[in-house]
Image (spheres, rainbow, N blue to C red):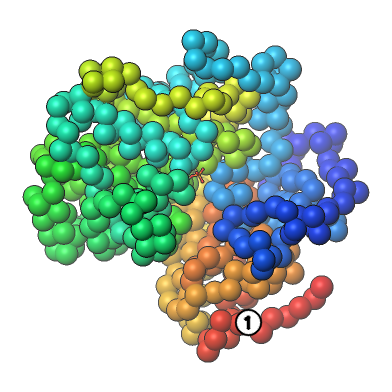
Amino acid sequence: MSNSIYPPSLSSTASSQSIDYGFDSEHIWHPYTSMTHALPVYGVVSARDCELTLDDGRTLIDGTSSWWACVHGYSHPVILAAMQQQLTQLSHVMFGGITHQPAIEVSKLLVEMTSPNLTKVFFADSGSIAVEVAIKMALQYWQGQASNSKNKLMTVKRGYHGDTFAAMSVCDPEGGMHTMFGQNVTQQIFIDAPSTAFADRELTETDTMALEKAFATYHQDVAAVIIEPIMQGAGGMRFYAPAYLQKLRQLCDKYQVLLILDEIATGFGRTGKLFAYQHANITADILCLGKALTGGYISLAATLCSDEVAKGISQSPAGVFMHGPTFMANPLACAAAQASLNLIKQNQWQQQVSQIETQLTSELANAITLPQVKDVRVLGAVGVIEMHQQVDTASLQQAFVNLGVWIRPFSNLIYIMPPYTISSCQLTQLTQAMKTVAKNINANNRNINFISHG
Ligand SMILES: *Cc1c(COP(=O)(O)O)cnc(C)c1O
């Protein structure tokens, strides 16, 4: 694919920058790391389109979209221009008692792109906070209905909704951090993870029974069900059937339970639909968006809700919605989101994601013949090789860097979620690397025998 959208003036001049690795390992936390057993980190000095440039001048093809956010690639001139313009005009202003056009424009786009019933927008700073806000909305809604008994969340196992405490309470109870924090994590109600495969039209008997029983037993205590539609992301990269969401929607309506859909990972095209819930032709009462909302340029998230939910909250004893972060609706982030959403609206993502899906399907298929591999699955711009055993993230990551790609496995999963703008040649390098690394994992233990060149 041509790089013609990038003017020559944007080319990287950054490889002269040096990285103080010593200070980093001594003083800076990275996600889920120890301060006594530092793991290797790679210094990135610039990024453009689908490539990261390291401090030593090497470039890596990015298979992660920086944790699934950077869908248009890095340094996209349209997003850069929008942010530069906004930066000189109004980088930040408080949102209490003040409004600004960037927030209004993003809200217009979100209301227009999502289902017609989702009309109200709350801006949050990150995905976890968008989930906190959604949970608080559901609880306040039922307070407004004088149903104080409805104060639990119901969800499925193997989910992931973020790292803050309310979000943690609805993450997978085993993979998540429930036992570690004991009573500080609210006890919620868990149903087994969906077992019906994405391609299956009919729900398995197991899923039907589990759902019906859970609703019949607990509905009086349940304010809302929260779930990642179609794809359970950080909890295991598992895809499940649209029929599951349809059944959930029916039961939520029947038993008067709100439905919160967490589209933070799946929103904006990743699974082949603009929103994953569209695979099932349903809608949410409350919808969480984040990650790709700004095209991955700056942190911003949003929680949308229906008129009905908004009215209920406004009639609750508090009379107002009890949330308001300092950096709510940051104008610079809104400008990035507006530019990114306008790119999404041009609809190129549809063809890009479908081409990525076709190519991933054909190139990853033969990985299933490797003895180390348990399953291979693809949906939209998501390609997953599931191994029989847990992998060592740090050593695999190094192997990937040596192969010129940036892929970060976790648990027993080697997966990619590349930017939609990736070329077919770059994508082939990613799938080749995935298979090479999977093949070189020693089946008998967690160490890998790996070709080391550098
Ligand atoms: C990443 C993610 C979150 C948390 O978002 P942060 O921005 O990391 O707080 C919540 N839900 C889902 C489905 C996610 O993938």
Secondary structure, mark 1, is loop
Q: In which quarter of the image is residue 408?
A: bottom right
Q: In which quarter of the image is residue 258?
A: top left
> Which residue is rendered at x = 74% and y = 17% of the image?
88
For mark 1, what is the residue? 448
Which residue is most to the front?
Answer: 183
Quarter placement of the C terminus: bottom right
Front residue of 227/33: it is 33
> Which residue is rendered at x = 13% and y = 49% of the image?
218
> Which residue is rendered at x = 53% and y = 29% of the image?
341
Which residue is most to the right?
Answer: 16
Mark 1 burial class by Cα count in 10 Å: few <14, some 14-19, many 20+: some
Q: Count the marks: how many?
A: 1
Residue 149, x across and y down, in percent = 15, 38
Residue 394, x across and y down, in percent = 64, 69
Amino acid found under the numbered disc labelled 1: Ile
**Could you tell me if residue 413 is visible in this image?**
yes
Residue 77, x across and y down, in percent = 71, 31
Give the side of residue 20 with respect to residue 325, left or right. right
Residue 291, x across and y down, in percent = 52, 41
Which residue is most to the bottom?
Answer: 444
Badge 1 residue CB within 8 Å of ligand 1: no
**Could you tell me if residue 58 is visible in this image?**
no
Give the side of residue 401 with respect to residue 95, left or right. right
> Which residue is rendered at x = 58% and y = 86% of the image?
442
